[in-house]
Every structure is written in C-alpha cells, then in structure tokens.
Image: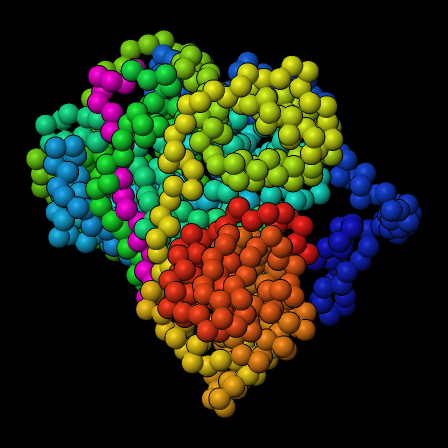
C-alpha cells in the first residue's frame, strides 16, 4: 500500500482494475493544518526541539543510569582497603563501560599514534625471578610491535602538544602475547580507575564548544585538577619538559602500574617496568613545540619513520624494579599507588634487556591503528597486583576494543594474532576469520577426546599467583594513598634551575588560558603544598593573589635521575644539522665538517634560499637538501655556518638571520667558521664571545662554537660535536628576548 508522507491514502480501482489513489475524507483539512504548523517554524525552533532533550544541569545528586543515587564515586568496591576490586560493583562497571563505548571508531584516548616493529633480547636469564620464557635466553629475539601516542588529542591533532605520551609494547612470545601498556611518565593522574572517566571528560575539549584540541590549558581540566589533590604529583611531570619530547626515540617508557614476577617455584616479587632510550632523554623548547605543531604537526611521527628508514634504529634498555613481598610495607609510600614512583635511591633499577625497532609498518591502518593492547595480556611468570588503577585497566581496555574493532574476534586481526598456537572453544562472533573443524565447542567432551584441554603449569599453563586476601567490602583506600605532596616535592627538588623555570612558565601558559579566576586560585593553593615559592611565582604570572600563608619549604630530599640533566649526553647519533650555504661558501671546509658529522652518526643537510645546486667559492657545486621556504631551525638539532664570501649575502638575508636567532632562542648548538661568524654578529645573539674572524682558534661558549679562518677546523669539529651531544644549552642569557 502506498502512503502519503503525512496522512494515510487508501487505494481504489478504476474501471480497468488499476489501482487508483484516493484521499480519505478530511485529508485536505489535515494538510492545511499541517502547512499552518510548518509556517510557525522559526530560528528558535530547532533549539527548542533540542532543549526538550537537555537534562537539568543543576541536578543535585549523582545517580547511576538507572536513577539510583550514588553515595561514593572516588573508589571502587574492594576486599579491604588494599584488596582486589570486586566485579559486583555495578556503579564502577556501569561508569567504566559507558565511558569505554563513548567514541566510535577512534580510541577515546591515545587516538594519535605511531608504530614500529622490532625485537627484544634479554641480557641474562631471569630464572631466579620469573618463569616467563622470553626472559630466559639471551640469544632469543622476541618480536615486538610498539605504539607511541599522544593521549588527549584526536587522530588529526599535532604530535608536539604538551601531553603524556603512550609507550605500549606487544611481545609476540612463544607462550602467547604479552603487553606492557605504559606511558612516558612513571605515574598517573589518579589512584583508582573509577576516576578515569572523570579525568578524561575534564581534559578533553569542553562540551559546549569542543575546544581546545589536544590541550589541557582550559577551565574544565584545571577545575578538576584543583579539586583533586592526588593529581598534584602528575601535574609536576606534565608541566615539565617530559611532556614535550624531542623524539619518540629520546623518550623514556614506564609500565606505570605495579605487577608481579613469579618464578617456577611460585615465589613472587612486586615489579615495575622501565624503558630507557640509548640516545638519552631530550625535549623540545616550548616555543619550538608550538611552532612545530603548525609547521609540521607530524614531527614526531615523521622522525620515527625516517630514523628507521635511514637505519638509525631506536634502542631502549628494559629495566625492572623489584620489591620482595615481605618488604611491601617498608616504605613511606604505598607500592600499589600509581601516583607514586619507587625512587631509585630506595629501589634500584636492574637493566635486563634491550629492545630495537628496525622496521616500519606496511600499512598504518592495518597495523598501527588496529593494534590492540591490554595490561591483562600476560604470560606465565608475570602476574598482576591489587593496584586499583591497574584493576580497572584490566577491564577497560578489553571492553573498549570490543566496540572499536567490531566484536570479540579482534585478536584474529593479523597485527594482534599471537605467534603461539591458539586453540579454544570460542568459534563465533563478528569478523571470525578462522574456520574451526570438528563437532565439539565445549569442555569437557567425550566426542572430541577432551581436546583442547587445560594445560598444567609444568606444560605451560598459566597459574594465577595465590595471594591470600581477607577483608570487608568497602569503598576506601589505604591511608598511605592520601600523601599527595611528598613525591611532588621530591620531583620539584630534583629539577635543575632551568627545568624549574620551564615548569613555572608552563604553569603560566596553562593557567593563563583558564578564564575562571577561582579555578586559577585553587590550583595555586594546591601547589602551595608542594613549594611556597613555586606557588608565589605561579600566582604572579597568572594574575591571582599569592597564598595567604606560604607553604612549607620543600626540604632537601632529591632523586637526581628524575632530572633530564643527568641523561646521556655523549652522542650525536641521528641528530640533524643544518648547514647554511649560499654561492661562495668554502667547500673544502664544508666537506670536512660534513664528513666528520656523518662519521659520528649525524645527518647534515644543506639549507639555502632555493632548491637546486649551490656553487662554492672554487666553482664546485653541491645539491641543496632544503630551502628556507620548506624548513626552519625548529626541525634541526644544530646549525652550522661555513666560511666564505657567501656570508655577505647571508647576513643580509632575513631568512638566515631568523634561522640563527630562532636556533639560539631554543638553546640549540650553533657553529660558525671564518666569515660565517659575521652572520652571528648580524643576529640578535648577545652575551656570547666569538673567535676572531680571520685568525682566531676555536672557541666554545654556551653552545656557540666559532673558529677563525686560520684556526683548527679539527678543534672546531670536536667542540661542535660536544655541543651537539649536550642537546640544549639552557644557560644562555635572556634567550626569551631574542626576536624569533
């Protein structure tokens, strides 16, 4: 039967029996009324329609989706204060399940990622500590896939935003897939996973206008942070240089949560995981990071890809901190608290292996985008703890992947498939790609000779560690979890003066973007618990009164390895060096410097006004790698200006002047020989002594290395390489005033 879109039409027949539509009585009148109704639509009509589905924003009490009022939403239901989280906690499950399914199809967090293949080798057998097979044979190379990521931004956001970075490793072991799902910071914002939806809702773009993108510098995040003291320690990390890494290849990784090693005898130890880059831990300057977000939003992704393509394979040492079970309570922090580190001075790191990334993915979507990690993916010899953040992660990751990857068979996607044989009775569901044979899909079964059957421990079966648990069901946390400021003070005390200055300026930027002065003031009051002087300096920069009473001084306790100033600074491998050259440069000198840099593993590139070839003073030509129009100092680690009459042209070029000024402002090494020094003199570089243009020997001062035309080029090269290995020279005076 055919129908009108507004009223029903009954069919009739003509004399030939053909169907004929006829309007029922009253249809015309109904249409008239309908047209009258339509004419009343105005510019407010749509908003009025939407208003009917808006819940009351002023509701007093928090409820479940079933309308049941909630008495507590900060801690999941556990067996005792430090026991495991209970599955019967319907509020926790509903809250996390709803959150896990809020985005389709991109990841809710860690949406923007980069991946690489590689392998892992252990240094020595770890039999004493764990039965995990991939940690026993130093000759064995276990395949891995690593995904690095930003956390807050959408897939289309920039790489160099201030943010935590994901550092997830999937080991394809002979005993099954094992995942370390970590970050580039050893701690997290919250204690209990039940607060995770609140955290991400606060830090994501604000609900009413979907701004800002990939940034925590806005009202809702800092409103949340200022009301949650447990976040304080993480704030110090996020506002440090750790949040703007120079490269994924120069970034630490951490397992964040507390796990267990269990050996063949059943003895367990608590363990935390660490990744240490062999190139050292280095960061961007904040001004540099902001500019890169505009000029090359793929900077970190591109850096990783190109490094692997050029054979500069990223390498990371794998380390573990271990605590004996009987020592669990012998610290002034709770070892299950994810907002706390285990200071290396109290629990040493044992470096037990190395990971090398040596192959880029063949297809970004099929591999990097579809890879699925979960901290519950463990192998025999590695077990879990009652860490309340970990307990929620064990559920949440799997739950998310069910919706993101289209159903329960996502482990059959090639990048997720284990290398070890898979045999079970789960044979249906969306996107099944294997074709199982046989009649039975259950256990026990007589028809199939009880296959596949459970494997005992001695045949590789996973056996959960038998931890004795007693306690009452309670929404609470151990008292040690409530020390929110001691380790934040420890982190602040451990920073160099330059690093402290960067943290203060980060607070100025972040809180300066907050429009609500009450929110700003609450954050200042919060960090007053870390250090009174820090709070005063922050208050001065964001236009709020300092705390009425200055917080207690930080004391003297430090952990030196928390500062990036203690990192590796003896290599220039994979560093990119810009060589500024115009017609008339000294070719012999360039060839000598360029070859020395290449021999040390660096990548020099000729940068000039235009692409093509540039002629030297002796009539030879050299291919230009980049033009000023397509690059800038921000994509290089150092700048070198050779001698020659071309310097007369360079010092009158705005592009060249800006290139040098900007590199100086960002603390980068700068080298110049002979006439090239004239460009430095024409720039805004102040407070640095230069070698004599003609006869002066090599001179290095605050990362600026100069040498006269008659000086030793070898001496210049040695000092320039030392300056590059240092990465940044933050001791330069008044860098912020450089006009770049």
* Name of the residue lying farthest toward the top: 472
Q: In this view of the protein, can residue 615 be seen by the observer?
A: yes
Depicted 431 relative to depicted 20: above or below: above
Which residue appears at 55% of the width and 13% of the height? 71
| Residue 222 occupies quadrant | top right
Depicted 209 relative to depicted 589: above or below: above
Of 71 and 727, nearer the camera is 727
* Name of the residue lying farthest toward the bottom: 619
Residue 78 location (% of width, % of height) = 38, 17
Residue 571 location (% of width, % of height) = 35, 56
Left or right? Give the position of 540 relative to 478. right
Tell me the quadrant of the picture where the C terminus can be found.
bottom right
Residue 157 location (% of width, % of height) = 57, 53
Q: Is residue 308 magenta?
A: yes
Q: Is residue 721 magenta?
A: no
Question: What residue span does the magenta drawing correspond to?
Answer: 305-329
Tell me the quadrant of the picture where the N terminus can be found.
bottom right
Which residue appears at 46% of the width and 45% of the height? 165
| Residue 15 occupies quadrant | bottom right
Q: In this view of the protein, can residue 99 be seen by the observer?
A: no
Of 260 and 103, nearer the camera is 260
Residue 613 location (% of width, % of height) = 52, 85
Which residue appears at 9% of the width and 38% of the height? 459
Depicted 688 relative to depicted 49: above or below: below
Of 265 and 445, nearer the camera is 265
Left or right? Give the position of 620 relative to 382. right
């Amino acid at each position: 039967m055919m129908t009108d879109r507004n009223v029903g039409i009954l069919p009739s027949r003509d004399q030939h029996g053909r169907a004929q539509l006829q309007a029922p009585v009253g249809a015309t009148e109904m249409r008239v009324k309908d047209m009258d109704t339509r004419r009343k639509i105005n510019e407010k009509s749509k908003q009025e329609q939407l208003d009917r589905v808006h819940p009351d924003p002023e509701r007093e009490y928090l409820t479940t989706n079933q309308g049941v009022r909630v008495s507590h939403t900060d801690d999941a239901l556990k067996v005792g204060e430090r026991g495991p989280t209970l599955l019967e906690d319907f509020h926790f499950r509903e809250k996390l399940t709803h959150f896990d399914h809020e985005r389709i199809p991109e990841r809710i967090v860690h949406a923007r990622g980069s991946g690489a293949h590689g392998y892992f080798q252990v240094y020595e057998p770890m039999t004493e500590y764990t039965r995990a097979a991939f940690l026993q044979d130093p000759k064995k190379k276990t395949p891995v896939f690593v995904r690095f990521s930003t956390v807050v931004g959408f897939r289309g956001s920039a790489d160099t935003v201030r943010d935590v970075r994901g550092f997830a490793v999937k080991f394809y072991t002979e005993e099954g897939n094992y995942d370390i799902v970590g970050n580039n910071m050893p701690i997290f914002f919250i204690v209990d996973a039940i607060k995770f939806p609140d955290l991400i809702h606060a830090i994501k773009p604000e609900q009413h206008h979907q701004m800002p993108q990939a940034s925590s510098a806005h009202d809702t995040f800092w409103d949340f942070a200022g009301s949650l003291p447990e976040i304080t320690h993480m704030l110090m990390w996020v506002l440090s240089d750790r949040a703007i890494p120079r490269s994924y290849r120069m970034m630490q990784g951490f397992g964040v949560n507390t796990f267990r090693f269990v050996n063949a005898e059943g003895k367990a130890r608590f363990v935390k995981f660490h990744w240490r880059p062999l190139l050292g831990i280095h960061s961007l300057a904040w001004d540099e990071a902001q500019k890169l977000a505009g000029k090359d939003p793929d900077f970190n992704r591109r850096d990783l890809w190109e490094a692997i393509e050029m054979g500069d394979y990223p390498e990371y040492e794998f380390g573990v901190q271990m605590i004996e079970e009987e020592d669990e309570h012998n610290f002034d922090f709770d070892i299950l608290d994810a907002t706390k580190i285990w200071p290396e001075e109290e629990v040493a790191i044992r470096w037990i292996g190395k990971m090398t990334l040596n192959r880029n993915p063949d297809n970004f979507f099929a591999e990097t985008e579809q890879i699925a990690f979960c901290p519950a993916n463990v192998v025999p010899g590695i077990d879990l703890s009652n860490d309340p953040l970990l307990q929620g992660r064990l559920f949440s990751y799997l739950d998310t992947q069910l919706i993101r990857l289209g159903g329960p068979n996502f482990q059959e996607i090639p990048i997720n498939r284990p290398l070890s044989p898979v045999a079970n009775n789960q044979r249906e569901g969306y996107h099944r790609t294997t074709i199982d044979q046989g009649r039975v899909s259950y256990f026990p079964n007589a028809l199939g000779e009880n296959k596949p059957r459970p494997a005992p421990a001695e045949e590789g079966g996973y056996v959960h560690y038998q931890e004795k648990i007693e306690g009452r069901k309670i929404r609470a946390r151990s008292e040690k979890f409530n020390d929110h400021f001691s380790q934040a003070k420890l982190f602040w005390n451990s920073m160099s003066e330059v690093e402290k200055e960067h943290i203060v300026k980060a607070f100025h930027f972040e809180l300066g973007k907050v429009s609500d002065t009450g929110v700003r003031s609450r954050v200042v009051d919060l960090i007053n618990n870390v250090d009174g002087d820090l709070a005063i300096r922050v208050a001065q920069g964001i236009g709020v009164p300092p705390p009425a009473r200055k917080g207690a001084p930080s004391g003297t306790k430090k952990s030196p390895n928390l500062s990036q100033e203690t990192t590796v600074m003896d290599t220039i491998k994979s560093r990119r060096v810009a060589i500024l050259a115009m017609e008339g440069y000294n070719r012999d000198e360039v060839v000598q410097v360029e070859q020395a840099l290449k021999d040390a593993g660096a990548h020099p590139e000729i940068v000039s006004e235009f692409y093509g070839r540039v002629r030297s003073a002796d009539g030879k030509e050299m291919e230009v790698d980049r033009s000023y129009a397509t690059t800038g100092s921000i994509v290089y680690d150092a700048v070198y200006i050779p001698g020659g009459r071309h310097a007369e042209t360079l010092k009158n070029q705005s592009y060249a002047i800006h290139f040098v000024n900007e590199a100086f402002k960002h603390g980068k090494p700068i080298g110049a020989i002979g006439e090239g020094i004239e460009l430095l003199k024409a720039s805004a570089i102040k407070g640095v002594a230069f070698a004599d243009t003609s006869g002066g020997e090599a001179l290095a001062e605050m990362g600026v290395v100069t040498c006269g035309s008659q000086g030793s080029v070898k001496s210049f090269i040695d000092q320039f390489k030392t300056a590059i290995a240092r990465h940044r020279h933050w001791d330069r005076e008044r860098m912020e005033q450089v006009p770049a």
